[in-house]
Image: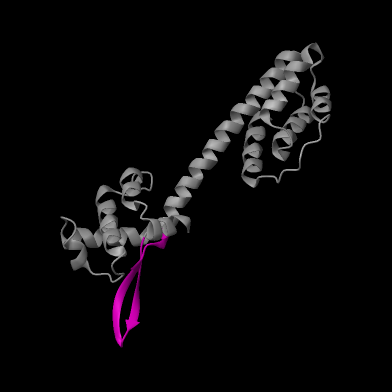
Amino acid sequence: MILKRLYEEYDVSIERILIKEYKRLKLSMQDAHVLLALFSIYKKRRTFTLAALSKRIDYTADQIGASVETLINQGFLIISLENKEGKEREVFDLDQTFKKIEDLFAQDELDKVKQQTETEVATTLRLFEQGMGRQLLPYELETVRRWYEDQKFSHEKIIKAITSAADRVSVKYVEKVLNQSVPEPIEIDEEVENVLDEIFKKIK
């Protein structure tokens, strides 16, 4: 996990991230405080005790226990038994917290891609409809979808081809213009493909 490595090796402030994002992670303020207390212990030792947490936050043992249970149930915290020198002790693992934060940020990036792609496709369809005086037919929509899905042509290039077509604008003509220059092959981004699926299902 990249975030875990950044935290352990480069002192990235996971605490600042949790303070800012705890609501989006669906944590209460109390649960977030307990999680922050666990992180304050994390680099020193992985031994879990309620006493160590009680020294760091102003909650009762019952409140801390309830938050620990919530963190376990929601997948932020794992507590297990470890045998060391013939003695058993409870140790904790916060790997899933790192993963949840990474997943949250990854979804943010996907949402940005989705929003940008929706805007670009809407602009392209609007220009076609204005130039042709009608809505695109299903096979024309499929052609436009393929342009964006295959990522052979940039959005800017597509718009330029449409506007340069003037009164000859059609999907077939614009595709001919776009194909006049041979683009370099680009690996299809699966996330973009999924986003386009959603966009064109709404249009159809």
Q: Which residue in the rendered view is the most extreme toward the front?
A: 10
Q: Measuring from the top left, give residue 87's x and y in whole percent.
A: 28, 85
Vertical order, 127 against 63 (above or below): above
Vertical order, 106 against 97 (above or below): above
> Is 2 left or right of 172, judged from the image as shown?
left
Displayed quadrant of residue 181: top right
Displayed quadrant of residue 160: top right
> Is 118 left or right of 13, judged from the image as shown?
right
Q: Residue at x 71, y 17 (%)?
A: 129
Task: Answer whether residue 197 is magenta in the image.
Answer: no
Pick whichever, 177 or 102, lies toward us.
Answer: 177
Tell me if residue 18 can be seen: yes
Task: Answer whether residue 95 is magenta in the image.
Answer: yes
The quarter of the image holding the C terminus is: top right
Pick whichever, 156 or 132, lies toward us.
Answer: 156
Q: Measuring from the top left, give residue 22's x and y in whole percent.
A: 33, 47
Tell me if residue 75 can be seen: no
Q: Residue at x 50, y 44 (%)?
A: 107
Q: Measuring from the top left, give residue 124's x and y in whole percent.
A: 68, 24
Q: Residue at x 36, y 44 (%)?
A: 21
Which residues, given as a range, are shown in magenta?
77-96
Q: Residue at x 76, y 16 (%)?
A: 164
Pick whichever, 159 or 7, lies toward us.
Answer: 7
